[in-house]
Amino acid sequence: MLEFDLISKYFTWDSKNKSVLLSVGDDCAVLEIAKDFQFATSIDTLIAGVHFSDNTSAKDIAYKALAVNLSDLAAMGALPKFYTLAITMPDINSKWLADFSSSLREISAEFNIDLVGGDTTKGALSITISIFGWVEKGMALTRSGAKIGDDIYVSNTIGDAAFALSFLNNIRKKPIDRLNRPTPRVGLGRNLLGIASSCIDISDGLEQDLSHILKSSKVGAIINLEKIPLSKCVKDYVYSNNDWSLVINGGDDYELCFTVPSDKKDLIKDIVSTCDINISKIGVINADEKLTIIGNTTNIGKSYQHF
Ligand code: ADP
Ligand code: MG
């Protein structure tokens, strides 16, 4: 199959998005941005053997590749709009490509986002997605706005993806979908605009990602391990093994960690019901220069390091 046939078969879809003036097929995509909005853009690469294991399905790889990018926009409170895809693969495997393409289409439809271009090359399997969204001018949620006294919250439960990864081969009932198909919290991010003072998505571990907020905001924090929301399987494991490292250092959950001034805390309840998601307060921002963790920290180590 020729490169161009492959692109037209697997990566060319109709778009109803009026902002897409020109999509896959020309030298560039041409996109319109709405008045009073600013572009937010991010890029993430998934490499076989590094970011997913060799037996991960094409469907899960496609889902995760877009989900992790959507999560970056979610963390900024931006509305996802377009993305480009650079795919490198060792050969043309029609079944693999059909699965990858159909899964990518599904998640694209779910989040109302369009594939508008890309690049296709031969080599070791690797997927890079560059995503574009927009956010109301001056409103983007950043890492730098946390203030002393703000409460610290996380969405849903923490540690599931790391739990699934640690026990990939030896526990039958593990939250594998939390690892392979993380849910980008786009709706939550949008609802936090004007409410959260800072926000980040948890990709490398709660301790490390919260520390990014602290560093950018030039503040400290105290969090309590017992307040971190855990799913049943993670809770059972953590309490019976006295091992909080999965929760504190484990990445890949793609939940949001954010701060909210205490005079806005009543608004959280509305967000919980609008977004149909649990939100838990895990600590407070203070004037220290560090992150203090209360609880059994014996087994806590370092969060994910890329190098
Ligand atoms: P060029 O040589 O001008 O860079 P290409 O031959 O690489 O263009 O790609 C032709 C068209 O197909 C372009 O519009 C490009 O954005 C698009 N494209 C290439 N690969 C992909 C892909 N994997 N997914 C989506 N669009 C793609
Ligand atoms: Mg090219």
Image: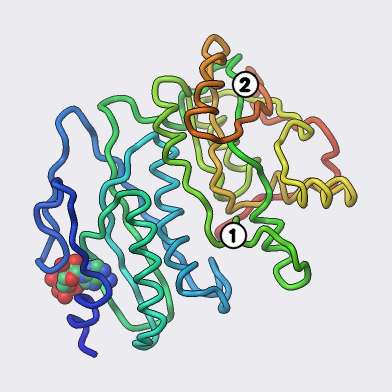
Circle 2: element type: strand
Compared to 253, does 65 lie above or below? Answer: below
Q: Is residue 285 left or right of residue 260?
A: right
Work out whether 26 lies above or below 151.
Answer: below
Residue drawn at 53 percent across, 34 percent down: 276
Could you say which disc has been placed on residue 177 in the image?
Answer: 1
What's the amino acid at mark 2?
A: Ile
CA gap, disc 2 and disc 1: 32 Å
**Residue 109, quarter of picture:** bottom left
Left or right: 302 with respect to 276? right
Residue placed under numbered mark 2 in the picture: 285
User: Could you say which is closer to the camera, residue 154 or residue 205?
Assistant: 154
The relative height of residue 48 versus residue 244 in the rendered view (above or below) is: below
Residue 76 placement (x, y as % from top left): 40, 36
As shown in the figure, which amino acid type bears the numbered disc 1?
Answer: Asp
Q: Position of residue 296 (x, y in %)?
A: 85, 38
Viewer-nearest of labels 2 and 1? 1
Find residue 46 and report its horizontal and vertical position in percent. Answer: 46, 65
* The residue at label 1 has a CB less than 8 Å from ligand 1: no
* Secondary structure state at the residue bearing disc 1: helix
Horizontally, residue 150 falls left or right of residue 93, namely: right
**Nearer-N-terminus badge (2/1):** 1
- For the view shown, which residue lies furthest in the top direction? 263
The label shown at residue 30 is none
